[in-house]
Amino acid sequence: MVATRSSSQGKLLISRRQLAIWACTLGIGMLFLIAWEIASRQGVINSVFYSRPTDIAERLWQDLLGAKVYGRTIYEQIWITSQSVLIGYVLGAVIGVLAGFAVGRSRWLSRALEPYIVTFYAIPKISIAPLFILILGIGLSSKVAIVSMESFFILFTSTLRGVLEIDEELVQVARIMGASRRTVFGRILMPASLPAIFSGLQLAVPFAVIGAVLGEYIASNRGLGWLVLYSGSSLDATGLFSAIVILVVLTWLLTQVVSRSVAAIAPWLPKDDGRVSQPTAG
């Protein structure tokens, strides 16, 4: 009875604390928007370059109602960018996980490739992106390739780290007891590396969006990335900020989808800090 009461009080305390954090977060955002609006209307900042929150909200409302933005509706622009993100993310994630397992299970190969892995990971991706445009053109393929590159490096390094941290003694004991390669992979290797893979999947989402925007920056005439670039070059600050808001919301939604999918697959995933812990027995 006492334990139940203590547990209920603890949950109530956590909910109140979380509510206070949300209220503080919302309050800071509201104060920032109010200060921005006042500064713009009083001439402290130039509304031509910084726009106003009310103007941005009005533009967003018009966009949501289906008004055309430079020849296309905002929904068409979102879909164009989303295609690159979704296809490239899945492709890069699959290849990254498979490559991470392949390299991680070979100690010799991982050591031999380590200098190249570090070198390629350190190269700014923006310097490689034009190469994809040159080879694949300005269509969807080049955007998918850039997104795949961003996702691949995140998943590859995450999976590689997870595989290298596996206790090799467990693998050797399982093999001595007659476990097949499939059994070792399904019962030891995969469960032990899942935390790193899940972490990489969530981390790769914003990088995938960045890759799509980068591709549209370099060579495109449509998409949210192009919309941000075109609005900025046209001195349309309201359109620029509204496109940025939509990009932020899109990234948040995709992150939530991945996070909830991971939580459904791995219910032992803590919800408070986003880290994955190993499942406990029975």
Image (spheres, rainbow, N blue to C red):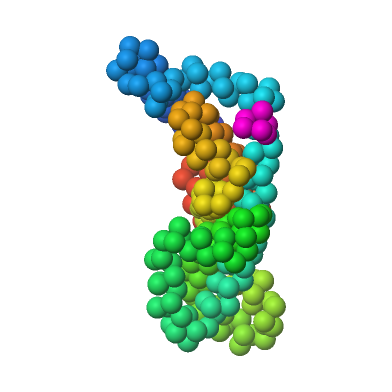
Most common secondary structure along the magenta stretch: strand
Across and down, in percent, residue 208 comes to: 55, 52
Where is the N terminus found, in terms of image quarters?
top right
Q: Residue at x 48, y 64 (%)?
A: 128
Q: Is residue 273 visible?
A: yes
Across and down, in percent, residue 109 comes to: 50, 84
Is 239 located above or below residue 228 in the figure?
above
Where is the C terminus found, in terms of image quarters?
bottom right
The answer to whether residue 80 is magenta is: no
Q: Residue at x 48, y 33 (%)?
A: 234
Task: Looking at the picture, tell me which residue is in the foreground, 208 or 56.
Answer: 56
Task: Looking at the picture, tell me which residue is in the foreground, 225 or 164.
Answer: 225
Identity of the residue furthest to the top in this view: 42
Across and down, in percent, residue 249 comes to: 56, 35
Left or right of 24 in this view: 254: right
Occupied quadrant, residue 82: top right
Q: How many marks?
A: 0
Is 122 located above or below residue 89 in the figure?
below
Task: Looking at the picture, tell me which residue is in the foreground, 73 or 79.
Answer: 73
Identity of the residue furthest to the left in this view: 44
Q: Residue at x 56, y 38 (%)?
A: 227
Q: Residue at x 64, y 77 (%)?
A: 184
Q: Is residue 260 visible?
A: no
Across and down, in percent, residue 190 comes to: 61, 68
Task: Looking at the picture, tell me which residue is in the foreground, 106 or 4.
Answer: 106
Magenta-tinted stretch: 68-73
